[in-house]
Image (cartoon, grey):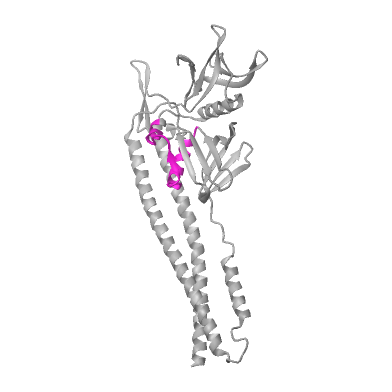
């Protein structure tokens, strides 16, 4: 049996009802269970499955000490106290993972790989490879458009120079306003206004949104909220859906991945403290696969990324494998009086989780391609306008040159 990853651990005490005393140790939260280890010996005093929890409450022991009580199936109540850094932080974190466990329709554990799952994964992998190739071509096309823009800017500068020279040739040498400075100023202002015109913002689609427990900077209190991954930004909201901070894509300097459930996002500043958020979520795996694609240069894994695939077998997938059932047939054996159910071509939870992460990547690439297409469409409009202006100026200069000849 593989050992579960420890998501978080807190020092505290557990009330041993049989001996009527408090035992000091560490409360450990795992993807599907809650453990309590004795401080001196390290023995496991409690192993409680999150799926067996009925209720989590904040209470007081002896009307003085703040505690957390967990009610288990069978009306068994467990008391935890002296939790550090404080009771609220521990309560919010445990409650978050417990609720995600309840909302997850799949069971713990993964079935063996199936031919149906392999076919789906191979199909999505091929689609992802082709979409990535298309995105590379689109990016190269965008660079070519940028080079065309630079060339047009040089042409406009050369035409302005030609305009000033022709103006000097057309005016008599004794005319004091041969350079016509007011005309040059008007033309430059017109170009500046055209360049500074606000661009139409492209579509900023939502790729994924997950509930999180966040910690801001050096603050030790974790609070519930949401993390939204957009095409061009990352948004962190509180429990009331108010935006606490919005990281633009170019603002993110560092993303550290501590585990499949915890990351840290940092923006560095000169002369003032960095702005960082530490985020913990039961669905962080869906975010990591997207961040790895969007922020390749800034993301850093402090653990083996291969554990992400293995940990999906320990965490119940929020994609129920019942969605992938096909060709179900039920056969009744009258001799034995037993019902035999045959399930053919079933996709396991691990395969469904892997497929979901791959689809997240496909969605990310698609949104980025859409944003790049919108940008290139705007650039094409600017190129068309610049070309028209250059054509008109060249015709005008040709007529002026013919008059001088």
Please provide percent x and percent y for residue 401. 49, 88
Outermost top residue: 19
State yes or no: residue 85 in magenta: no
In this rendering, the answer to whether 372 lies above or below 237 is below
Q: Is residue 119 left or right of residue 393?
A: left
In this rendering, the answer to whether 235 lies above or below 41 is below
In this rendering, the answer to whether 231 lies above or below 156 is above
Please provide percent x and percent y for residue 236. 57, 41
- Residue 76 lies in quadrant: top right
Please provide percent x and percent y for residue 284. 48, 36
Quarter holding the N terminus is top left
Instruction: State the residue at coordinates (50%, 58%).
Output: 374
Residue 374: tell me if it is visible: yes
Instruction: State the residue at coordinates (57%, 25%).
Output: 90
In this rendering, the answer to whether 82 lies above or below 382 is above
Q: Is residue 241 left or right of residue 386?
A: right
Residue 325: tell me if it is visible: no
Q: Nearer the viewer, residue 134 or 290?
A: 290
Q: Nearer the viewer, residue 274 or 313?
A: 274
Q: Nearer the viewer, residue 351 or 390?
A: 390
Outermost right residue: 63
- Residue 2 lies in quadrant: top left
The count of marks equals 0
Outermost left residue: 115
Q: Which residues are magenta?
A: 282-310
Instruction: State the residue at coordinates (37%, 17%).
Output: 338
Please provide percent x and percent y for residue 355. 40, 39
């Amino acid at each position: 049996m593989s050992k579960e990853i420890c998501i978080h651990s807190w020092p505290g005490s557990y009330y041993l009802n049989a001996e009527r005393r408090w035992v000091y140790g560490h409360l450990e939260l795992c993807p599907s269970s809650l453990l309590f280890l004795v401080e001196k010996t390290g023995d496991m005093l409690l192993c409680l499955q999150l799926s067996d929890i009925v209720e989590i409450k904040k209470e007081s022991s002896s009307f003085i000490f703040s505690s957390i009580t967990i009610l288990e199936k069978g009306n068994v109540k467990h008391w935890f106290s002296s939790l550090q850094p404080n009771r609220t932080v521990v309560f919010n974190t445990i409650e978050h993972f417990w609720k995600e466990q309840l909302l997850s329709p799949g069971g713990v554990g993964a079935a063996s790989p199936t031919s149906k799952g392999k076919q789906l994964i191979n199909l999505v992998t091929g689609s992802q490879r082709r979409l990535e190739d298309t995105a590379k071509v689109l990016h190269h096309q965008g660079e070519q458009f940028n080079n065309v823009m630079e060339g047009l800017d040089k042409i406009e500068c050369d035409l302005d120079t030609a305009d000033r020279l022709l103006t000097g040739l057309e005016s008599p040498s004794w005319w004091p306003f041969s350079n016509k400075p007011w005309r040059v100023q008007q033309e430059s202002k017109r170009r500046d206004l055209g360049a500074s015109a606000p661009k139409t913002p492209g579509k900023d689609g939502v790729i994924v949104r997950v509930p999180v427990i966040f910690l801001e900077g050096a603050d030790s209190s974790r609070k519930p909220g949401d993390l939204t991954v957009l095409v061009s930004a990352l948004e962190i909201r509180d429990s009331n859906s108010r935006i606490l901070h919005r990281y633009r894509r170019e603002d993110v300097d560092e993303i550290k991945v501590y585990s499949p459930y915890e990351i840290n996002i940092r923006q560095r500043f000169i002369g003032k403290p960095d702005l960082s958020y530490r985020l913990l979520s039961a669905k962080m795996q869906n975010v990591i696969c997207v961040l790895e694609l969007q922020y390749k240069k800034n993301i850093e894994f402090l653990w083996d990324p291969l554990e992400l695939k293995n940990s999906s077998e320990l965490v119940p997938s929020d994609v129920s494998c019942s969605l992938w059932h096909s060709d179900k047939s039920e056969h009744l054996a009258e001799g034995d009086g037993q019902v035999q159910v045959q399930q053919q071509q079933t996709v396991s939870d691990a395969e469904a989780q892997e497929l979901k992460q791959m689809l997240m990547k496909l969605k990310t690439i698609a949104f980025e391609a859409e944003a790049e297409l919108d940008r290139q469409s705007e650039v094409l409009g600017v190129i068309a306008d610049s070309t028209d202006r250059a054509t008109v100026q060249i015709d005008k200069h040709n007529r002026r040159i013919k008059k001088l000849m």
